[in-house]
Image: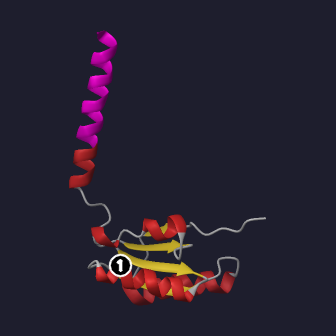
Amino acid sequence: MTHNKSIRQEVIELETYKSNYIQKNYVEGKVIIITGASSGFGKLTAAAEMGGKIVLAARSEEKLKETVAEIKAAGGEASYIVTDVAKKDDVFAMAKFAVDTYGRIDVLVNNAGTMP
């Protein structure tokens, strides 16, 4: 039974942690850039429903437009900039866009990548 108590205690601690974490909205008001945001994990990461100001960056403008529309339809705040992270000028433009649009950058989710 000692083992079960240990597991039970771990579950209680985890639930307490999750409850405390959820009560504190660490995203609200943050300016968050997400690269690779037109599909997959990058698209799913968009935290606008929690009050973040999301800058979506990817190469596919059509998909970016769709994702921004979905976020706005859900009541979130989002904008996009077409960006190829393999191009240094695009990355600088992305950062400038975020600062020009929202005044700062709080979080960068560097999700874009290239495959061999």
Q: Tell me the amino acid under the disc marked 1.
A: Ile
How many residues crowd mark 1 within 10 Å: few (<14), some (14–19), many (20+)?
some
Residue 49: where, in percent of width, then height? 30, 70
Identify the residue under disc 1.
Answer: 71
Q: Residue 6 lies in magenta, yes or no? A: yes
Residue 65: where, in percent of width, then height? 46, 87
Which residue is located at x 45 percent, y 84 percent?
66
| Side (left or right) of 30 relative to 96 | left
Which residue is located at x 65 percent, y 77 percent?
85
Can residue 109 be seen from the camera position used here? no
Q: In which quarter of the view is residue 73 placed?
A: bottom left
Residue 113: where, in percent of width, then height? 66, 68
* Along the line of sight, the residue nearer the viewer: 68 or 27: 68
Q: Is residue 88 above or below residue 7?
A: below
* Magenta stretch in the rendered image: 1-17
Q: Residue furthest right?
A: 116
Scheme of image coloration: secondary structure
